[in-house]
Amino acid sequence: MKSLQYNFKKAQKGNPFLSTLIQFSIAVRHQNYTSKKIVEWFNRLVDKNDYTSSNKKEVIQYCVQLSDNNQNTPEEG
């Protein structure tokens, strides 16, 4: 697994005109990062102007869900 910071920089390079929030979402998607790691790097990398402080908790929870590789996997049976 690549570091979240590495994936973020890669997302920035490939999508320079998107907001840091969208770039962060791209970086965490299907990477299975822990919620602790996502919160830590969210606070470091995402521009505070890209989200409202009242929605920060929901935005971070969405990023945690994006990171979960098994979220949309159908059950085997």
Image: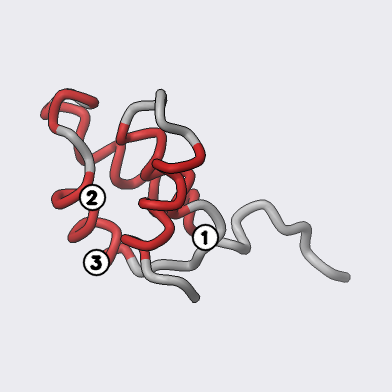
Q: Which mark is residue 68?
A: 1
5 vs 64, nearest the viewer? 5
Residue type, mark 2 in image:
Phe
Which residue is at the far right? 77
Residue type, mark 1 in image:
Asp
Left or right, 75 with reference to 53: right
Identified at 38% across, 70% down, the residue is 3
Residue type, mark 3 in image:
Lys
In the rendered picture of this protein, how many numbered marks are placed on residues?
Answer: 3
**In the rendered image, the vertical position of residue 19 relative to residue 60, given as above or below:** above
The residues tagged by marks 1 and 2 sit, at their Cα atoms, a distance apart of 16 Å
Crowding near pointer 2: few (<14 within 10 Å), some, many (20+)?
many
In terms of secondary structure, where does tag 1 sit? loop
Judging by the rendered image, the residue that carries numbered circle 3 is 36
Identified at 39% across, 47% down, the residue is 63
Crowding near pointer 1: few (<14 within 10 Å), some, many (20+)?
some
Left or right, 35 with reference to 7: left
Find residue 45 and report its horizontal and vertical position in percent.
21, 47
Colour pattern of the rendering: secondary structure
Find residue 52 and report its horizontal and vertical position in percent.
16, 23
**In the rendered image, the vertical position of residue 11 relative to residue 21, given as above or below:** below
> Can you tell which quarter of the image residue 18 is in?
top left
Q: Which mark's residue is nearer the viewer, 3 or 2? A: 2
Q: Earlier in the sequence, mark 3 or mark 1?
A: 3
> Can you tell which quarter of the image residue 50 is in?
top left
Q: Earlier in the sequence, mark 1 or mark 2?
A: 2
Left or right, 55 with reference to 61: left
Please indicate, yes or no, whether residue 57 appears anywhere in the rendered image.
yes
The residues tagged by marks 3 and 2 sit, at their Cα atoms, a distance apart of 10 Å
